[in-house]
Structures are given as C-alpha cells and as structure tokens.
C-alpha cells in the first residue's frame, strides 16, 4: 500500500514572508499580511468552504489549486496558536471537513463541528500527531496546516514530503519568515496566474 504524503501549502510574499510585522492573536496575518491571500478570497471553492460573502466566486486555475488541496487532504495537523485564533472566527462548519490534530501542551476533549471536522488535541508531540493523522487520512494525504512554527518543526524533523508555495506579488518588508535553514528542495512545477504564482516542490532525500 502506498503511504500517504505529508505536505503543506502556504502563501508567501515576494520578499519571503508568510505574515507581516506585528502578527499575533489579534492580528493573525500581521500588518498587510492579508494581501498575500487576496487571490484566495476571490475563488469559488474558498467562498463556498467558508460561507464567505454569499458564495459565488471565480473558477479557473486559482480555484483549481484550492479545490485540489482540499480534495487531497484526508487529515490536517495544526498548531495550538493557530487553532486558538481560528476557533473564534471559523464558521460553525469549520473549513477543514476532515479530522484535525492540534499539537498542544494543553489537554482538551475532542471538539466535533458540523460538516465533518473534529479537532483532536495531541499532547505528546509532532510525531504522535502525524501518526494519528496518517491513520485517519487513509489513502489521502496529511496536510500540515500551520502556523509557521509547526511547519518549521516538521521540516526540521524531515517529516515533510512536498510543499506548495503561492507567491504573491506584494512586499511586506518584515514579519514572519518560514524558509531560513530548511532542507534542500527540488522544484516540480510552476503555474503563473494573474495575481499569484503557484510553485510546487519536493523535499530532497
């Protein structure tokens, strides 16, 4: 049986930041960080998933990117800080629609949401969270959904197979970096769209 892949997909500014300066619980993407994801907010799949602006939205390559990410994901792993930020803002039907394993040092009973999302709280480390996510995902892939610190931990542990970068033509000038000191990666493909360039990489063995 083919083992599922472990991947992440993130938006990054042209100068290499996932979030702008002053990022925090009250300012999750930092100053100007939402500009990285302007293309996402226009897509039909995103708007449907988050019940955003009454639906609608654009189809095409950008929407395909979002849709394919959701379709391949059988389970997600999430950092506690990102969960805490999302808990107060996600709709009743959280957008994951699959099991989510939250890496934390604060135990909590599973939180079941409408639409197929259940949050499980894992207190014994990233490898345990990944093992549980793999078991839940079956033959689908496991997505490391963030935030930056959690992705860095999985990269440093050599547990990521591939990743996608959505490179936005914006400059933030500072903020949260992801890719300092990561292992080597080989480019697989590039797709240029009007508002973003979609890049895909496989981690070097």
Image (spheres, rainbow, N blue to C red):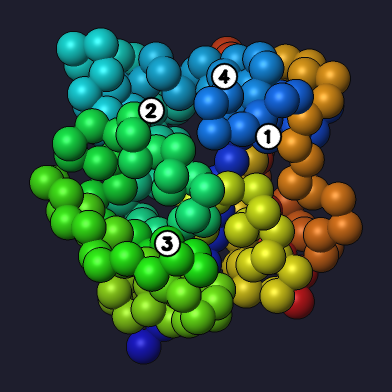
Residue identified by numbered label 3: 102
Q: Of the residues under marks 2 and 3, which one precedes in the sequence? A: 2
Q: Residue furthest bottom?
A: 1
What residue is shown at x 58% (from left), y 48% (from top)? 147
Instruction: Give residue 58's position: percent from left, percent from top.
Output: 34, 15
Please give the label number shown on residue 63.
2
Q: Of the residues under marks 1 and 2, which one precedes in the sequence? A: 1
Kindly check if marks 3 and 4 are in contact, taking CB atoms under 8 A apart as contact: no
Q: Which element carries disc 3, helix, strand or loop?
A: strand
Q: Which element carries disc 2, helix, strand or loop?
A: helix
Q: CA distance from mark 3 to mark 1?
A: 20 Å
Q: Which element carries disc 4, helix, strand or loop?
A: helix
Residue identified by numbered label 1: 18
Kindly check if marks 1 and 2 are in contact, taking CB atoms under 8 A apart as contact: no
- Mark 3 Cα shell of 10 Å, populated few (<14), some (14-19), many (≥20): many
Residue identified by numbered label 4: 34
Q: Of the residues under marks 4 and 2, which one precedes in the sequence? A: 4
């Amino acid at each position: 049986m083919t083992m599922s892949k472990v991947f992440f997909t993130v938006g990054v500014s042209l100068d290499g930041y996932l979030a702008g300066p002053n990022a925090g619980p009250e300012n999750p993407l930092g100053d100007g960080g939402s500009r990285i994801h302007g293309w996402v907010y226009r897509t039909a799949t995103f708007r449907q998933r988050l019940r955003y602006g009454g639906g609608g939205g654009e189809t095409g390559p950008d929407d395909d990117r979002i849709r394919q990410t959701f379709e391949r994901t059988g389970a997600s792993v999430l950092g506690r800080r990102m969960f805490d930020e999302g808990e107060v803002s996600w709709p009743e039907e959280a957008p994951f629609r699959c099991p989510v394993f939250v890496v934390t040092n604060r135990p909590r009973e599973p939180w079941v949401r409408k639409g197929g999302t259940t949050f499980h709280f894992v207190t014994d480390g990233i490898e345990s969270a990944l093992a549980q996510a793999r078991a839940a995902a079956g033959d689908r892939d496991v997505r490391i959904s963030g935030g930056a610190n959690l992705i860095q931990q999985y990269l440093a542990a050599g547990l990521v197979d591939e990743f996608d970068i959505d490179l936005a033509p914006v400059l933030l000038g500072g903020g949260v970096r992801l890719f300092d000191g990561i292992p080597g990666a080989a480019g697989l493909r590039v797709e240029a769209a009007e508002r973003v360039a979609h890049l895909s990489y496989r981690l070097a063995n």
